[in-house]
Each structure stands twice: as structure tokens, then as C-alpha cells.
Image (cartoon, rainbow, N blue to C red):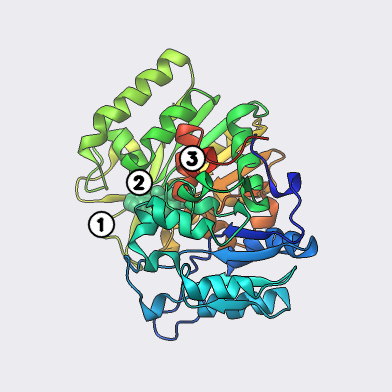
Amino acid sequence: MKKTIRDIDVRGKRVFVRVDFNVPLESETGRISDDTRIRASLPTIRYLIERGGRVILASHLGRPRGKVSEDARLKPVVERLSALLGLTVAYVGDCVGPEAEAAVGRMRDGDVLVLENLRFHAEEEKNDPGFARKLAALADLYVNDAFGTAHRAHASTEGITHYLPSVAGLLMEKELSALGGLLASPARPFACVFGGAKVSDKVGMIKNMLARVDVVLVGGGLAATFLKARGLDVGKSLVEDEMLSEALDIMRESTRASVPVVLPLDVLVAREVKAGVRTAVVQTTGVPPDASIVDIGPRTIEHFFGRLEACRTVMWNGPMGIYEIPQFALGTKCLINYLAGLNAVTVVGGGSSVDAVQDMGLAELVTHVSTGGGATLELLEKGTLPGVEALNDA
Ligand code: ADP
Ligand code: MG
């Protein structure tokens, strides 16, 4: 267990809060197209304001690669944050140096200041100790609420913790308790449903979770590699040949541990991956050589639901098909609907999977929607993250 902001006194203290304000911006207007990440940081910010902390917020945005980039300034974020909080948030054009120091010096208890994009300095991603020390010099306490960046050991997520008392924010705490709960003490039976594009992104997580769950269901692009490893012909489907031996390893471990890895029975196939094409449902033993698997089929959906029905915990990562094309989205949509209605702890992680749940308006009906992306997968693979390890123990 890590210390959180609820374990410390912040009144009158300068609190450096690493947040994840890496929001998507519309390329033409520079407007924020989705402010979920800003909203996710509000509980921590409000908590600190209410208790008289001086709240210094720092984040990265986009990929400026160590140089000042006008389109990666945090100005639009500051405007949105001011509106959401209903107060004037101060903003300073650098995250270290005299200008930042002066802005912090002007703060009073309960004030909020946003520092400029951390990644305008190459030292941030290099976890440069001198840079970390400069960031730390702005504050008395450090709070990490940027769960989505906690798998990176950067100056603002790891380096800075060497110089300040360091605790978790409320979003970080929520993520760690939901995902940590899957690892530590899940209600059983416990199922993982994996899909998405690539086995290579997920193999570590699948192996770690296989040792902890009662059943694993595999759909999406991953399934083609597993089916091929079982000796089936998958036509032109996305396959990672270099992952065939990993897939076999996983299936061998599944047999050894008596934890079923359930593959699709039938799939939706198409000759081209684009909207409007003719599709067909075929058994996985009968995928035509000139077709690709684009979704799981109806028997598979029923079969998966049968496996999930008795489960008390379900973790889902990765779409069941190429859900961006509505014709290929049925498997993913049915799964989301099913999870939303299931009387179980349901956790969704991964960028695409979370988007799909939010697009359907069902985020409130699952237990936890993880904000993490890569951090979520790495936590489920390794059980810890560098930015979490670095925080003080409770
Ligand atoms: P997440 O972001 O939820 O972790 P991934 O990034 O692993 O998920 O994968 C998402 C992508 O997987 C989507 O763009 C989707 O189109 C793709 N995908 C799903 N099923 C297939 C498939 N059968 N063939 C190719 N790509 C697929
Ligand atoms: Mg993704």
C-alpha cells in the first residue's frame, strides 16, 4: 500500500501534482476533443484546494520531443480546467526556472497553477536528476495522479520522488485499488477476456493473468495467431508469426494449470477490411484462404457469455473485432452490453476498449474503467509500475 494525499497535511504547502493532461486536440482548431483526463484529475485537485494546499499541476501533452512546440502548449487545458473548477487557474510558460519559481512564489493557499508542458525539456523523458531536482525545488510535497504515465520512469514521475515526500493522488489510488484488487483478491470465478490487435502487446499480461484466473477468453486480432498456432488456416487474417511459439506456450500452460484458454468457434470474415463489404460467418475450421477474420461470430458470443455467466470478476481488454467499422463491431458491442449487465466486478482497460465502452454510454455500468492504456497492461503484467514503486509506503 502506498501513502495517499489522505495521509498527509497539505495546508499552506506547495504541492507538486503530476497529472495526466495529455488530452486529444483537434488538429485544425487545437480544441480539446475529449476532456476525460482533465475531469479524472478533478477529485485530487479539489481535495487539495479545499484543504488549503497550493496546487502546482504538471503534465506532458503530445510529443514535443524536448523542444518548445506551439501546438503542444497547455493553454487549452488551462482554460478547460478553469471552467471545470469554476475558478481562475494560473498558467506559466515553463515548468522550471525563474518564471516558474516566481509564479509559485505568488501563490496563496488554495491557488492552482499549471506549469507548461514537461516534455518541452528533453531531460523529462531522460529522467535527468538535475531536472528532477529543479522540479522538486518548486514544492514541499509531491503527488502522482498520472496513472497513465506511471509505467514510465521520467523526471516528473520517478526522479522527483528522490527529493520530496511522495504520495498517490485519488485517481492513482482508485486505479491501484481496482487493478490491484484483480491481482490480490479477486472474487471467483475470475475471467479475463482478451482481444485487440497484437499478441506481442499483450503476451506478458496474458501470461501473468493466466496464473491468476479461472478462464481466459480470446477474441479480436489476437485470436488469429492462437488459431494458427493450433494448426488452423486463418486466411489473410492479421497474424504475428513471431508470436506463434508464445501462443503455443500459453496454451501449454493453460493445459498444465487447467485454466481454459477459450478461442472463437466461429468468426465473421470479409475479403476486404472496409465498410460496406460482403461478410460471412464461418466456423474457425473453415476460414477461406482469401478472407480475413474481422469479428467473432454469434456462436462464439453465446459461448463466451456461457463462460462469463457464473463469474464474479471479469477483466476485459481489447476489442473482439475491428470495431471501428460498424459492420464488424457486433462482437465488441455484445460483450460490452453483457458486461454492463453482469452481476460481477467488471474492469475494462486499454485505449480502444475504454473508448468503445464510453461510446456506448455504458461506462457507469461497469465497476471500473481504467484510464491507463499502456500503464494498465503493464500493471497487470508486472504487478507494479516505476511511478508507483517510487511513492512512499503507507
Ligand atoms: P486496447 O487499446 O483496448 O488495448 P488494442 O490496442 O490491443 O486494444 O487493439 C485495438 C485494435 O484492435 C482496434 O483498432 C481493432 O480494430 C483491432 N482489432 C480487433 N480485432 C481485430 C481483428 N480481428 N483483426 C485486426 N485487427 C483487429
Ligand atoms: Mg490500443
Q: Amino acid at mark 3?
A: Leu
Query: How far apart, in angstroms, are the residues tagged by discs 2 and 3?
Result: 27 Å
Residue at image position (56%, 60%) is: 19
Residue closest to the far top: 256
The x and y percentages for residue 230 are 29, 27
Of the numbered discs in the image, which one, if any, rests on residue 221?
2
Q: Nearer the viewer, residue 351 or 45?
A: 45
Residue at image position (24%, 45%) is: 288
Q: Amino acid at mark 2?
A: Gly
Helix, strand or loop at label 1? It is loop
As drawn, is 357 to the left or to the right of 93?
right
Callouts 2 and 3 close, C-beta under 8 Å: no
> Which callout, 2 or 1, points at the residue further toward the start of the chain?
2
Q: Mark 1: give few (<14), some (14-19) or many (20+) Cα within 10 Å.
A: some
> Which callout, 3 or 1, points at the residue further toward the start of the chain?
1
Q: Mark 3: give few (<14), some (14-19) or many (20+) Cα within 10 Å.
A: many
Q: Nearer the viewer, residue 237 or 353?
A: 353
Give the residue at mark 1. Answer: 271
The x and y percentages for residue 160 are 50, 50
Beta carbon at label 3 within 8 Å of ligand 1: no
Give the residue at mark 3. Answer: 385
Helix, strand or loop at label 3? It is loop
Position of the N terminus, as image quadrant, is top right
Instruction: Mark yes or no: residue 317 visible.
Output: no
| Image vertical order of residue 173 relative to residue 80, above or below | above
As drawn, is 99 to the left or to the right of 106?
left
> Which callout, 2 or 3, points at the residue further toward the start of the chain?
2
